Amino acid sequence: MRPVLEWIVLIVFLLVSNCCYGCLKEERNALLQIKAWINHPNGKSLSGWVDNDEDADCCKWRRVECHTTTKRVIKLSLGWIRHWKRGDLYLNTSLFLSLKELRNLNLSFNQLVCCMQGTGALSSELRNLEVLNLNDNNLNDSVLSLLRGASSLRSLKIAGNSLTGMVHINDLGSLSNLEKLDLSDNLGLKNFISPRDVIGLRMLKSLHLDFTEIDGSTLLKLVASLPSLQTLSLEGLSQVAEVPPEFYNLTNLEELFLDGTTLPRSILLNIGALSSLKIVSLRGCTLNGTLPDVGWCELRKLEQLYLSTNELVGELPACLRNLSSLIVMDLSYNQFKGNIASSPLVDLTSLQYVSFSYNQFRVPASFASFSNHSNLKLISCDNNELSPEPNLQTSSAPVFQLNYFSMSNCTSETGKAEYPYFLYFQYDLRLVDLSHNNFGGPFPSWLVENNTMLKQLYLKNNSLEGPLQLNYPASNLTTFDISTNYMHGQTLKTICSSFPNLVNLMIAGNGLTGGIPQGFENMTNLAYLDMSNNEVSSSLFELLPSFGSSLWYLKLSNNNLEGRMSPAFFNQTRFEYLYLDNNNFSGQIPNSLSKKVFPILLDMSNNHFSGMLPGWLGNLSEVQVIDFSKNHFQGSIPGEICILAGLQFFDLSENNLSGSIPSCTNLPEISHVHLYHNQLSGPLTYAFFNSSSLVTLDLRGNKLTGRIPNWINTLSKLSILLLKGNNFDGDLPVELCLLTQLSILDLSLNMFSGRLPSCLRNINSTAIWTKNQFPSPGQSFDVPEDSWLSIGGLKLPQQGVNLIERMMLPVISVEEVIEFTTKKTYYTYKDSILNYMSGVDLSCNRFTGEIPKEIGNMRGLRALNLSHNNLTGAIPSTFSNLEQIESLDLSHNDLTGAIPQRLIELYSLAVFSVADNNLSGKTPEMKDQFATFDQTSYEGNPLLCGPPLQNSCTEISQPPSVADDSTDGLEHDGFMDMGGFYISFGLAYTTVVVTLATVLCINPHWRRVWFYFIEMFITTCYYFLVDSFLKLYQLLSGGRN
C-alpha cells in the first residue's frame, strides 16, 4: 500500500510542478524553431514568442493552446502567418515531431511547398494528431506521402493547393479514421481514388471536392460507395450530363452542395430518394423550366434549400407545402412569377429565412398573409413588384419580429411608394434596406427609434427631404447609407450626435452645404466615409484630426473643399483609399513623410496642386491606383514609381510635366497609363518595357520623339495605344502587328513615314472586356466563424451567410475614359461602350504607297482615318467588307481611280470623305447611307462626276469597235468632246485677232505705242542674235588656236 501511495504523491507533485512552470522546455524550443522557420528569411511574425524568463510559458503565447493539466501543446493555429511577398517556404514536418501530444495543426495560407529534404511522415511521431489544415498553400502531390499511416487523423484539409492527377489509395487509404476530407480548389486534380479502393475511406462523413477537374458523373458514381457520407460538396465541377442511379443510394446524406455545376433537370425529379437530406444547395446549376410537383417535394426533413441564380420560371408548385420542416429558402435570381400572398410559402410556418429577390413575383405590401409565421426572421424581396392588400389600415400587427428586411428597387402597382405597413410594428430589426424605391417625405426617424438594436440602415436613392432629426442617439447603428437623397440643413451635425458609433457612413449626392462639423472627432469608430457629390466647402486639411485614426476609406470627391496639404496630413491618418478629386485644393504636396503609409488608392485629380511630384510615391508599396491628373504639377516624373510592383492605374495627364518618361521595367501589374497633355520629351526607350498587363497607354499631346520601339510586342495585352500629337517618326514596326488585343490605335499628328504595313489587319476589332477593367479591392473580408450563427441559433453554411451579411468592401471608382476622334468629332468612350469601340487613326503623317487591301478584312472596325498623308493608288475594293465601319476618312491624299461602287453596302457608315484626291469616274449611287453625304465628301477631285456633285457624267454613244489600248482613256469614257474643243479654240483665236486690229485702227495713240513696242522688240532681238553669234565665233576660233 505504501509504494502505491508514494507513486500517487509523485504523480501529483509532477502535475503541480508542470502547472506551476508552464510548458515543457523541449516544446518551447520546438516552437521557437518553428517561429524561425516560418519567418525565413526576414519575417517578424509571432513577435510574442520569445525565450526569456518573463514569457517563458509558451502556453500563454498567442496561437498556442496547451492541455489544462499536462501543459503539453495540443493546438497550433499558424494560419496566415507568412506574408506572400517573402516567397515560398519548404514544409519541414520534423520541426513538429517534438510536440507529441499535438492534436490540431493549422498551417494554411503560408506559401508552403513540398518538401524539405529529410522530411518524414507525420505518423512516425504525431500519433495524436486529429486535425490538419494545409489549405491554400502551394503543395503538390508529394504532401500526400507524408500522411501515410496517420491513422489518428479525423479531419484533413488540403484545399487550394497544386495537387494534380489522381489521389492514390496508398496515400489516403490508411487514414482509416478520417471523417472529414477537403481537397477543393486543386485545379489540376483530375481523378479521385478508384471504386475498389474506396473502402479505405468508409468512415468518411464529410467530403469537399469543389472546383477540381474531376468528371462530375464519375465522381457522383464513386461517392455512392461511401456509406457513412453525411456532407458532400462538389461545387464548380464539369457538366453532369446524367446523375448515376447509384448516387441516390446515399440514404445517410444530410448536406448536398452542387453549386455552379451544370446539372440535368432530372435531379429535381429523383432527389427525393435521398430522404435524410437537410440542406440542398443547387445555386447556379443552369436548372430551367418550372419546378416539378414530384420528387424534390418528398424531402420532408429538408431544412435549407438554395435554388438561386438559375433559369427557373413559372409559379411555385403546390407540393412545396409538403416541406414542412423548411427553415431557409432562397429562390432569388430566377424568373418565378405569381402572387406571394397566395403561394405555398404562406403555409410554411416554420420558415425563418426567405429570399425571393430578383424575380417577377408580386409581393404583398403588408405581408399580412404571413401572419402565422411567428419564427420569421429574414425577408429579402428586392427587385419585385409590390402589390397592395385590402384593408391595409385595419390589419393587425404581425406576429413575427424580423431581424433582416431588404426591399430595394421594388416597383409599385399604384406608382406611389409607401413604407410597408408592417414595418411600423417591428422592434427587433438589425438590417433594413429600402434603397431605390423613391420614398419621399422626411427621414423615417420612427424606424430607427423603434428598433434600438438596428445596426445597418440603407436608404440610398430615394427622395427623402429635410433635416435629419432623432429624439435620442442610435448608439447601435454601425452602417448608415442615405446617399442620393435631398437631405439638407444640419444633417452632418445631427449624424455626428445621433450615430456616435458609426463605422460606415455613406451620405453622397445630397447637395449638402456648409462645412464639415467638428463633431466627427467623437466618431472614433468611423472607418468608411463617402461624402462625395455634395457642396461641402470646409478647409479639409485643418479638420483632419477630427476624423480619427480608424478611417481607412475617405471619399470627398466633387465638393468645394479647399486648403493646402501640410506635412502632417499623411502622418495623422491611415487612409488606404483616399479620394480628393474635383475640389479646390491647392499648394504643393510635401516631399517627405515622417512615417510610413500604405495607401492603396490616391486620387487627387482635378484640383490646383502644384510643384514637383513627391519622391515618396516610390515608397507606397501597396498602392494600386495613383491619379494626379488635371493639376499644375511640373518637373519630371519621379523614377521611384518604377518600383511600385502593385501599381495598376497611373494617371498624370493634363499637368506641366517635362523630361523623359522613366524606363520602368518592373511594373508587372500596370494596366492603365495616362500621361497625355504634358510636356514630356525624348524617345520612349524602355518606358513600360515588358509590362504584359498593360491595357491602355495614352501619351497624346506631348513632345515625344523617335520611333515606336521594337519591343512594343512585349505589351501583349495592350488594347489602346494613343500617341497622337507628338513628334514620332520613321516606319511603323512590324512588331506593332503582333499586338493581338490592340483595338484602338491613334498615331495621328506625328511624322511617321513609309508604307502602311499590311499586317495592320491583325488589329482586334471585336469586343474586349479588359479595356475598363480595374483592380480588385485591396482588402479581403472573410466571414468570421461566429457570424455563421443566425439570430435564431441556426448554423448556416456560406450560402446562408450571404443572405444576412453585408460587408463594406472598398469601391474602386476610378473611371477609364478614352478620347478618340471619329466622325470628325472628338468623342469620349467609357464603361461598356469602350469595350465595343475599335478604331484606327493614322491621319496627318507622311505615309506613302498604296493602302493595303488587307485592311479591308478588319470587319469589326468602327472608325478608319487615313487622311492628310501621301497615299497613292486606288481605294481597295475590300473596304466593302468593313461591315461595322461608322467613319471612313481618306481625304487629302493622292488616291486615283474610281470609288468602289460596293461601298454602298456599308450600312453603318455615318461619315465618309474622299475629298482632295485625284479620283475619277462616277460617285457611288445615292442610296442607303450614301444618300446622306453631300458634295463636301467628294470635293477636290476634278475628274469625279455624278451626284451630289454639280458636274454630271456625259455618256456618248459610239459604234461597236475594238478598243484601242493606246488611246487616252478619257476620250473613250466620253469625258471630253475633242471636235467641240477645236471649234471653240478657233473661234476664240479669231475673236482675239479681230478685236486687236479694230482697236489699233480706231485709236492712233495705242497704234503708235503698239508699233513702237514691235520696233523695240525687233531691235532687241537683232542685237541679241548678233552679239551671241560673235561670242560663239570667238569661242570657236580660240578653240582652233
Image: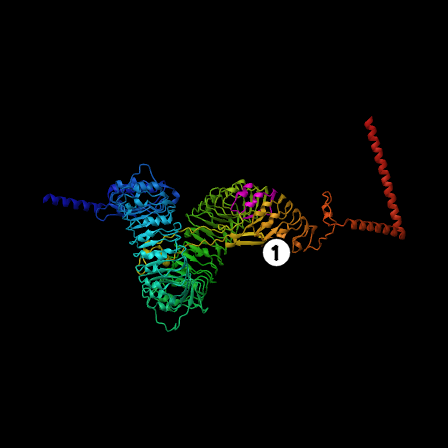
Determine if residue 135 is in view.
yes
10 Å crowding of disc 1: few (<14), some (14-19), many (20+): some
Q: Secondary structure at mark 1?
A: helix
Percent of width and height locating residue 408: 42, 63
Colour scheme in the image? rainbow
Q: Amino acid at mark 1?
A: Gln
Decide which of 423, 40 is in the foreground and name it.
423
Quadrant the N terminus occupies: top left
Find out whether residue 744 is within the magenta segment.
yes
Count of residue discs = 1
Left or right: 764, with 933 as reference point = left
Q: Residue furthest left?
A: 1
Question: Can you identify the residue that label 1 sits on?
Answer: 929
Residue lying at the far top in this picture: please name it: 1041
x then y, percent, for residue 72: 24, 45
Answer with the quarter of the image where residue 264 lies.
Answer: bottom left
Query: Which residues make up the magenta segment?
Result: 734-763
Question: Quarter of the image containing the C terminus?
Answer: top right
Identify the residue at the far front of this view. Answer: 960
Residue 844 counted in the magenta span: no
Q: Viewed as shown, does residue 626 lie left or right of 447?
A: right
Residue situated in front as seen by the camera: 486 or 225: 225
Is residue 47 visible in this depiction of the protein? no
> Along the line of sight, which residue is nearer the eye, 915 or 695?
915
Picture coordinates of residue 670, whole percent (x, y): 47, 46
Residue placed most toward the observer, 1024 or 407: 407
Q: Position of residue 339 (x, y in %)?
A: 40, 66
